Amino acid sequence: MTMTKLQRKIYTLTFVGIFFILAPALIFFAKGYRFDTIAKVFVHSGSVIIKSYPKKVDIYIDGKKISNKRLNFINNYYIINGIRPGRHLIECRKPGYTQWQKEADVHSGISTEFWNVLLMASPNKTLQTYDPQNIQRFYLSPREKNELILYQKNENAKTISLFNTKTNSLETLYTDKEEENTFIPDKEENIEWSSNHKKILIPTSTKNQKNYTVTTIKKTDKSADINLLDIFSKITPSLLETTAIANEVKDLETTEDASNENTTLIKNESTKNSKTPSTKITKSNSSNKENQIKIHQGRWIFDSDTEIIVLTENHKLLILNIINPQKSIILDNEVSGFDLAGDHIYYTKLAGNHIWDIKTNHPERKKIVATISTKQPTGNFLKMIAYDEYRIAIITDKKELYILNNDPEDDSIFFGHIGNNINGVQFSDDGKKLLYWGPNEIFVYMLREWKVQPRRKKGEIIFITRFSTPITNVQWMQNFENIIFTNNNLVKMAEMDIRDHINLVDIFQSNSPAEEYEYIYNKDNYVLYFQDTSDKDSQDKQLKSITLLENTGFLNFGN
């Protein structure tokens, strides 16, 4: 049928009209605008970004599943565009996994971001029970991600063994049948590997006296187990009766903020003398009885399997050479606590107001990294946990937590008391957060500004959770935005995102209550190792594991 001239004109005008009506709408839509049917106006929409584990999850907004056609998956995260401004309920779900949900405000033209959404898989699929029995303690091995160190106590002997969880093979490293000897007298201490992974340092006790034993992984005819107290007996008394003083420090500057008794400004200090440092040796008036060596703490020196740093019960800090004891070096006296980070030794003294730093390849030199203008926390021994010279945590014998936080970027320095009744702390790998906890509470202290959502300020304290019953086995997970811990029979995971509420999920329920040091999460293979009974009526605990996150997908993140 042939169209008349009038009909063609009508069709042309109609299409032109539709174009002029739809073109602005399409342009508005492309720029993120949506039509509000209530207000009858175009509003600039927002978006939501979600990086989840596992990668493939179902996303719901206000109870409605988002179609895959609307999901943009770029660089391992989802982008959901075209969300009207306002408060929305956002959920991530996947069958067989825990759920995640949070109410969040979506703003016009702005992305609301969630970078650490973790959904835990059901533990029933990955639960494993291992063969070794009579395990008193176990530790992660730094050599292989599927290797553990076991301390087993049988009727006839006490043994330290390497256990491969993949092959189920057990290799005995050290055996002791002496009744007067005990392994692991202090549960807070770990078996420690030398940097070359050829030797391990085992905390022991001999006749109720603290000791350490060094054993070699691959023994040869020349290899022999070494007892540190025996090494001390080979050191000439004159060395142990000297006081070493290196790098006299002058012109110390301190600035005190009198407005806050719990907060003190401190300044980094070092010697102003450019001459070669000297070492002065002066005789001590101490009696032989006072100089009788009793060990308080021992650690491997970095990049060495022949030297161990030891803090004695009479507060001497020294580098002990276990091959040639006469090459041992006294570092300082009246030391109350120490830690190692990088290739540096950090320590405090019973008297004075300094935190000291010694670089291990220059033991004759030492410097002050912090001068505290008010009295340091007092105590017989302090527990130091150092990330570097700028970030150090101190726990007193009264379980008070003090933080040194020096930020060179803005020249701000803080030393202050931030918590009481603290059981432990852990720095995040990037040094921007400090996880700390007491018997019933968990907190995170921000050491640096956090510039991605949710943004956090330096010095901010984030309360994570509180329970009326004891919290144990508190650990960072690998993204350092999620925390795993135990409470009675439950293994739980909490996030750090305080927007709306903190997601707190139950991962696993054990048959017996979780004791401290019975649960260790390995961030390298996403496996939680733990000790549990076979059922609720049993008394004997077995070594088990569950895999929390599957190591598959792009960059081993997601599936």
Image (tube, rainbow, N blue to C red):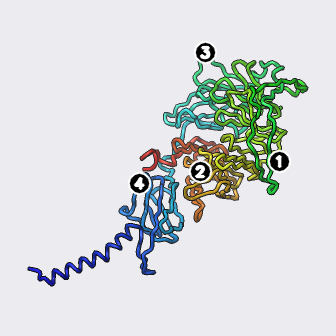
Q: Residues within 10 Å of mark 4 (few under 14, many from 20)?
A: few
Q: Nearer the viewer, mark 1 or mark 4?
A: 1
For the residue pair 259 and 436, the one nearer the viewer reads as 259
Secondary structure at numbered mark 2: loop
Q: CA distance from mark 1 to mark 3?
A: 55 Å
Q: CA distance from mark 3 to mark 4?
A: 58 Å
Dot 3 or dot 4: first in sequence order is 4
Q: Nearer the viewer, mark 3 or mark 2?
A: 3
Q: Residues within 10 Å of mark 3 (few under 14, many from 20)?
A: few
Q: Which residue does the numbered mark 2 point to in the structure image?
A: 510
Quadrant where the image shows the N terminus:
bottom left
Q: Residues within 10 Å of mark 2 (few under 14, many from 20)?
A: some
Residue 378 in view of the camera: yes
Dot 1 or dot 4: first in sequence order is 4
Q: Which residue does the numbered mark 1 point to in the structure image?
A: 374
Disc 3 and disc 2 in contact, CB within 8 angstroms = no
Q: CA distance from mark 1 to mark 4?
A: 52 Å
Q: Residue at x 83, y 40 (%)?
A: 352
Secondary structure at numbered mark 4: strand
Q: CA distance from mark 2 to mark 4?
A: 39 Å
- Under mark 3, the amino acid is Asp
Q: Please give the count of numbered marks on the rendered protein.
A: 4
- Under mark 4, the amino acid is Ile
